[in-house]
Image (spheres, helix red, strand yellow):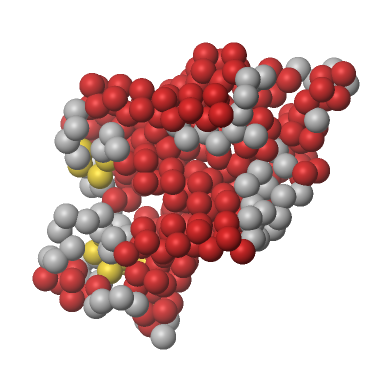
Amino acid sequence: MDTFLQQIINGLTAGSVYAVVALGYTMVYGIIQLINFAHGEVVMIGAMVAFTVINALVPYGLPPLAIVLIGAGCAVPICMLVGYGMEKLAYRPLRHAPRLAPLITAIGVSIILQHVALLIWSRNVLAFPQIIPSRTYMVGGAAITTIQIAILAICFGLMAALAILIYRTPLGTAMRATAQNQQVAGLMGIDINRVIAATFVIGAGLGAVAGVLYGTYYGLAQYTMGSILGLKAFSAAVLGGIGNIPGAMLGGVLLGIVEALGAGYIGDFTDLCQYGWLAGSISACDGGGHFVLFGSNYQDVFAFLVLILVLVFRPSGLLGERVGDRA
């Protein structure tokens, strides 16, 4: 039972990050029916920018929380600018082209962003300074750290804020109208280009926060990190129902839990942490040698197995594709 509860906590932590990234995919798809495969690279850029800023500020002796917040404050606008540039330069000229053209363009933009990051930050795995102290609390025999609590609070706070934006503000109304019918929304006085650009900018901002959380928690960043994280977030969006905002949230959380439960019951991760056998894989073991999150490469198998099963048995996702609610 302790193992089960531990994996639920781990899964919620991973799933909340997936959900925030998945929101970027589902928002863009809901608006223009495009799978923005470059979104994972936006998350990577957010982590890299935060790494650069945090490394530069550490020698000045500022409070650790202030350093991380400044890093995030720099990463978010830069990623928003990247998101706006992608929409303006790469996707807008192809808005009325056959659907395959913007899809291929998205893959090309992803490769370009990866190699730009390679030129700026090199191909090496970059280690985030571990400046935020983390305490571990026991909950029913399972361990949860203060950083995990912060990740959960920030991610669920962002999801709630986005839901309010989509369903309670004029911009959200314009986004839902544009998603339903662009031509009619334009006739009603909605600036379609502005709404679509705002969707990319908001999604990129969410991706930047997810990248900062990922890098701060795992202490690692690399120019290829956005590929697998983006594919998992896309899987989460499909699981919940691509184009559906609540579906992306649900899909991300469920995918994280499925991964954690599946990977957590294959092998004794406590022993692996204690003896250092997880070297070479992305893992996080607390001071007591207990598996915290992402300790096995099996988790990738479960993520994409879920995607295959959903596509086979319920292509519209768990919550379906409710056209009127898309954004």
Vertical placement of 55 versus 133: above or below? above
Vertical placement of 14 versus 1: above or below? above
Q: Residue 172 is drawn in which quadrant?
A: top right
The residue depicted at 26 percent of the width and 47 percent of the height is 219
Vertical placement of 143 versus 100: above or below? below
Closer to the camera in the image, 104 or 296: 104
x and y percent of residue 63 in the render? 30, 39
Horizontal relation, residue 82 to residue 188: left or right: left
How many marks on residues? 0
Vertical placement of 259 versus 138: above or below? above
Horizontal relation, residue 171 to residue 61: left or right: right
x and y percent of residue 269 in the render? 25, 73
Q: Is residue 118 visible?
A: yes
Horizontal relation, residue 128 to residue 144: left or right: left
Q: Residue furthest left?
A: 275
Quarter of the image with the C terminus is top right
Q: Residue 272 is drawn in which quadrant?
A: bottom left
Q: Is residue 198 visible?
A: no
The residue depicted at 69 percent of the width and 58 percent of the height is 319
The residue depicted at 38 percent of the width and 82 percent of the height is 2
Closer to the camera in the image, 235 or 251: 235
Q: Residue furthest bottom?
A: 1
x and y percent of residue 254 in the render? 53, 63
x and y percent of residue 136 in the render? 32, 67
The residue depicted at 66 percent of the width and 30 percent of the height is 32
